[in-house]
Image: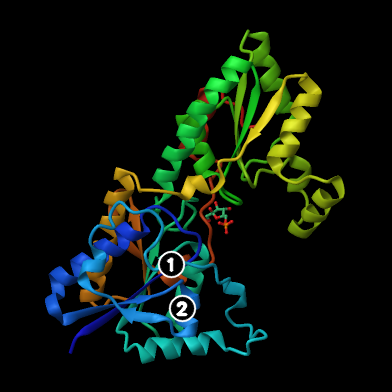
Amino acid sequence: MKKRVGILTSGGDCPGLNATIRGAAKALYQRFGDDVEIIGVQNGYAGLIHGDWRVMERHEFSGILTRGGTILGTKRTPFKMMKVVEEDNIDKVAAMKKTYKDAKLDCLLCLGGNGTHKTANLLSEEGLNIIGLPKTIDNDIYGTDVTFGFHTAVDIATEVIDRIHTTATSHRRVMVIELMGNKAGWLTLYSGIAGGADIILIPELPYNIENVIKAIQRRADDGKLFSILAVAEGAIDTAEAAMKKKERAAYRREKGIRTATDRIAAQIEQATGFETRVCVPGHMQRGGSPSAYDRVLATQFGTHAAKLVEADQYGVAVAMKNNIVTTNPLKEIAGKTKLVPETCDMLTVARRMGISLG
Ligand code: F6P
């Protein structure tokens, strides 16, 4: 009997999804030859709910190593809605189990971030054979040192900071660069250091705007008439840190604060008189071809998943720990987020460099 292996990609796209799909597929064909069939589920869990799947051909896994995004399509299907029956009257969990059965899957590889792993764990608890593969430019999946997509995003964000230096120095401006990361500041921290940012603000370390202004003023006093801030989209100040999520949203609405970076830029300009601009690279940070690092990581992860399929080892997520590819039980990582800890080496590096963390 042929082994039938399903693959889906869920959540935000990121570089390295196709490279991981390719790694898994090629290693599966190496191991099983014609005794394996790979089933592509379209658009993540939405495809699993709606029975949108097809048997893929070998040639579809060629030429995709360098391609950004995902050949399977992706969608955000929030975990918190998985057990909620909405207007369409569909019991999503039952529908996903039915598709798994209809497609005669022996197992399903779920490529995605935190939300994806929560649903992967739910499906595993429902008795399906699931393997999670950790993707996200946020690098915030618990139990793995790194996720694929992260280092490519760091490269892109670093290039943004490099290029912004030109305008910042020529016009003697303060440039506030908004980088992705609502809860986790890894991308901002790494690219901020790589790009030589003067101030780095991340969600895990609520800032005091007075400290930010002082850091800019100190640079100006030293004759440095420009400053570059790398700010995570989820950066909050110390007053907001004391508020609950809903309270904070209401506070921002009331004050007309659209984004963290808009507010920071306005406060800096008002306090210092320096011309201050915001730059938002947005989804470019997730776009295009994966870096060499991510191609290697994706291939390591994908081929490891194939090995797990051969060993019938399910209910796990692939991970990298101390440079060794390994696994974590899904139930141990689902629902946990890996934030930048106060003890993080990179924070120490930033402080040693005199970078203000607000
Ligand atoms: O999780 C990846 C990520 O790019 C986050 O950094 C960002 O906050 C979010 O997705 C943006 O989501 P969307 O593409 O749905 O706007």
In the image, is 12 to the left or to the right of 280? left
Residue 234: give x, y in percent of width and height. Answer: 64, 47
Q: CA distance from mark 1 to mark 2?
A: 9 Å
Task: Tell me the crowding category of disc 2: few under 14, some 14 to 19, or many 20 or more residues within 10 angstroms, Cα based.
Answer: many
The residue that disc 2 covers is 47
Note whether ligand 1 is within 8 Å of mark 2: no
Q: Label 1's element?
A: loop
- Mark 1 C-beta to ligand 1 under 8 Å: no
Q: Residues within 10 Å of mark 1 (few under 14, many from 20)?
A: some
The colour scheme of the drawn protein is rainbow
Q: Quadrant of residue 200?
A: top right
Residue at x 63% of width, y 90% of height: 89
Q: Is residue 194 left or right of residue 174?
A: left
Query: Up-down: is 15 above or below 308?
Result: above
Q: Evaluate if marks 1 and 2 touch, with contact meaning CB atoms under 8 Å apart.
A: yes
Q: Relative to the observer, which residue lies in front, 169 or 271?
A: 169
Q: Quadrant of ligand 1?
A: bottom right
Residue 11 seen in render: yes
- Position of the C terminus, as image quadrant, is top right
Residue 315, horizontal then vertical, whole percent: 37, 75
Under mark 2, the amino acid is Gly
The structure residue drawn at horizontal position 42% and vertical position 87%, both measured from the top left corner, is 99
Label 2 residue SS = helix
Closer to the camera in the image, 244 or 112: 112
Under mark 1, the amino acid is Gly
Quadrant in which the N terminus appears: bottom left
Q: Residue 183 got which mark?
A: none
Q: Which mark is residue 73?
A: 1
Residue 349 visible from this viewpoint:
no
* Residue 300 lies in quadrant: bottom left
